[in-house]
Amino acid sequence: MSEHSKSKPGPPIVGVSKNIERVRELIEHVASTGLNTVVFGESGVGKEVVAQNLYQKSPRLGKPFIKINCAALPEGLLESELFGYERGAFTGAEQKKKGKFQLAHSGVLLLDEIGDMSLPLQAKLLHVLQSGGEFSPLGSEKEVKADTWVIAATNHDLQKDIEEGKFREDLYYRLNIIKIYLAPLRERPEDIPPLIDFYVKEYAAMLNNRRVEKPSADVIERMCAYSWPGNVRELQNVLKRMLVLGDCNQIIDELFNNEKAPQNGENSDSGADHHASLSTIIDLGGKNSPDNQSFSLKSAKKKAVEMVEREIISHVLGKTDWNRSKASKILKISYKTLLYKISDLGILPPEK
Ligand SMILES: Nc1ncnc2c1ncn2[C@@H]1O[C@H](COP(=O)(O)OP(=O)(O)OP(=O)(O)O)[C@@H](O)[C@H]1O
């Protein structure tokens, strides 16, 4: 999804864990209130789905639901996207433009990655919330008023950000009237089988009802034992791969192998490590070795590219303290592509 877009209706919240049951309960209670809410949880865990479900169960359904990703835009651009501007407000402002706050009037504004918002913009947001939705678009003297339900989402520990002076405490208390926490998938493996069921049906329809085989009970058991660093988003990617390519066990073997691979720029420059990498790629003596019929240069090349990508991305994430917005700029790939690659390549955040 682009960094600021209208959202399509979200899926139901699938899961049977205590955490998901509690989240469903909270949604039922909160949806009709319009109280400022923050959804916390790791990347890919379902924060946007929760925001969409809040909206769908609220009296605001049918009004706009607008999402903006605070990490994906530089400060100035984020400000003008949020609050709009008058013609001539800055170089290049040829037309007056409404901001997302105003466009979401009578509906919902999802501020995704709120933890990445700059301090000056946090101050402006606080002012808007305190004044009941009043603000001036850039270059305008006049105040506009928007009745917008603000839902924020973050994978940061905002309490820690407050201690480190990166997040305003007053804004935290203003936003965080209702707090919804989504646990990582590895802490609620009982949700994995129902998620698999749900998405196998969904993808079968997407693949033109081509006959797709649901992973076997053994495969599902192995999937429940994996740590899913990219959470539900990673599970979706793996399922798609399984449904299209088959050979579920090999796909899971790769997941577990990647789980053990060096992470976050750990040095692997020694000759021995290079040899280890090469043997992982061509699986010397194993199923995918050149001596085996299933070996191909193409598949070995794909593995090699993935390995190099994993090492470079891990290194840059390590250097930027896992600030994915900064990392995507250094890597010169979009934020969304970086999230996809983190999940797809199974890159794990450092242990705290
Ligand atoms: N409980 C769930 N039931 C059904 N689908 C889910 C569930 N949780 C997550 N998903 C799906 O997983 C994908 C990732 O979820 P989502 O985008 O909501 O995560 P997120 O926490 O907002 O991630 P990010 O922090 O990276 O933006 C989406 O396609 C979403 O529909």
Image (spheres, grey):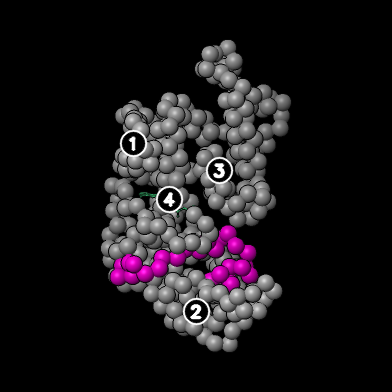
Residue 341: give its label: 3
What residue type is disc 3 on?
A: Lys
Tell whether 57 sits left or right of 146.
left
Choose top left, top right, bottom left or bottom right for residue 326.
bottom right
Q: Position of residue 89 (x, y in %)?
A: 64, 79
Which region of the structure is painted magenta? Answer: 58-82
The residue that label 1 is drawn on is: 209
Circle 1: residue type: Asn
Mark 4 beta carbon near ligand 1 (under 8 Å): yes
CA distance separating discs 2 and 4: 29 Å
Residue 134, how many percent across, how many down? 48, 82
Asked if 298 appears above or below 75 in the picture, the reply is above
Q: Nearer the viewer, residue 243 or 180?
A: 243
Query: Mark 4 is on which residue type?
Result: Val
Residue to which mark 4 is pinned: 45
Q: CA distance from mark 3 to mark 4?
A: 16 Å
Would you place residue 56 above or below residue 282 in this image? below
Residue 77 is a magenta residue: yes
For marks 2 and 3 on the same chain, the one whose residue lies earlier in the sequence:
2
The mark total stands at 4
**Alpha-carbon distance for marks 3 and 1?**
28 Å
Q: Is residue 18 above or below residue 132?
A: above
Q: Marks 4 and 1: which is nearer the front?
A: 1
